[in-house]
Amino acid sequence: MNIILLSGGSGQRLWPLSNNIRSKQFIKLFRNNDGNCESMMQRVCRQIYEVDPKANIVIATSKSQVSEIYNQVGDSIAVCVEPVRRNTFPAITLAVSYLEDIAGIDKDEPVIVCPVDPYVDNDYFEAMLRLEQIVRHDGDGIVLMGAEPVHPSDKYGYIIPSDNSELSFVREFKEKPDMKTAAEYISKGALWNCGVLGFKLRYLLEKSHTMIDFDGYDSLVRQYTDMPSISFDYAVLEREKGIRVLRFGGAWKDIGTWNTFVDSMSEQIIGQAVFDDTCKDIHIVNELNIPVICMGLNDMIVVVGNDGILVTDKEQSSKIKPYVERLDSRARYAEKSWGTFVILDVQERAMTVKVSIRAGKKMNYHSHNYRNEIWAVLSGDGESVVDGVHRTISAGDVVLLPAGCKHTVRAITELNIIEVQEGEEITVHDKLRYEQIL
């Protein structure tokens, strides 16, 4: 099975654990069979390989997510990177062009496109194998997958099929309705739109060429910045005739808000927390190494993360986005190709950061024009380079980095550093990169 996983999103609805760098699919909140926490990204990739060990996965994503994807699923899964964000039609077009030119997939092969963040059982991906076979043997158009609704919902789009067969033609699409209208759709046999579609590679390449003037993957990358931002639904689905939908009768959930997430939690508490016996129907998620105590709460969600603290009624949790937009957009936690950083404190002319570098990883060789830095090594062993001078560092060592000096660090074992930044301008844009020296 050739499958394109769409990985996007800004992460506002699962604040404070998600942000404009760390989208919801990277938050490790689900227990796997070993009892360890895994993310939606890790869960979906694991499930695909359990159903189809030979699956060819390509993750279509933006530059900001590449490091986190490699950190979570390794580098054996292909990643197709958008030069800039341009919505789902350009992203899917770039990914199918990648499959042809870079991965060498035959044009007559079926391709399945799927969001990276559904909460499902393995039968969902078994249904995708059925979808693949329909595309392979029965036509050159688009076949969607729709889930049978279990209740009216205003959070999902709807597909209204022509009949109740397992495979039927699509009569019309409906956007997210109010609850009353959703119930009317369901009474007409409507399906939840899972965002899953199947087609032959040749079909979408030919369709894309009628809308975009490009000559292969490299050509598309070069002109990607100038492409319009347009959804696949608007560009293709709303204009295409003869689209069919495969009915999926298993459990399907799009976890886009905290109230939908806690419905899938196998436990009431994740992290360090306790609640008294007067609490009813509450869920606590705590990512920090500090205790949380809840008393007298009913039907509530408490989430503690590096970016902030959320205390919300479950129903209101789905309405968080406009309030997050009012906040300072600075992400206080992020995963990088070399490890992670957590902002501990911000002052007018200073910022304190905890930097964790994984064994064998290193930062870019770089400098800052407007700030001085101090590295205090908490634990681990590594090697620093300051203006070409190499030095072995370990717990207790301090490295001074005046503005303008070129510097980098490599971890021999996992290296934890407190970095103090001081200067008239502290910004991510104050960074000049040089040829790697380690």
Image (spheres, rainbow, N blue to C red):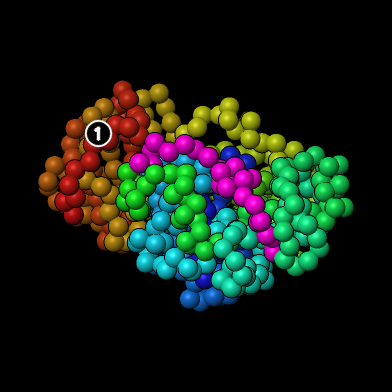
- In the rendered image, is residue 92 in sight? no
Judged from the image, the secondary structure of the residue bearing numbered disc 1 is loop
Front-most of residues 56 and 388 = 56
Q: Position of residue 277 (x, y in %)?
A: 81, 52
Q: Residue 376, percent across and down?
A: 30, 45
- Quadrant of the snapshot with the C terminus: bottom left
> Badge 1: few (under 14), some or many (20 or more) residues near its Cα, within 10 Å?
many
As drawn, the residue found furthest toward the left would be 388
Range of the magenta residues?
Answer: 223-248
Asked whether 69 falls inside the magenta stretch, the response is no
Q: Is residue 422 above or below residue 132?
A: above
- In depth, the one of 186 and 276 nearer the eye is 186
Judged left or right of residue 434, residue 225 is right
Residue 231 in magenta? yes
Tag 1: residue type? His
Please tell me in which quadrant of the rendered image residue 80 appears: bottom left
Image coordinates for residue 394, horizontal then vertical, percent: 26, 55
Please tell me which residue is depicted at 75% across the width and 52% down the height of the picture.
171
Q: Nearer the viewer, residue 137 or 259?
A: 137
The percent coordinates of residue 195 (x first, y second) are 63, 54
User: Disc 1 designates what residue?
Assistant: 368
Residue at the image position 42 percent from the left and 27 percent from the top:
347
**Residue 410 in sight in this render:** yes
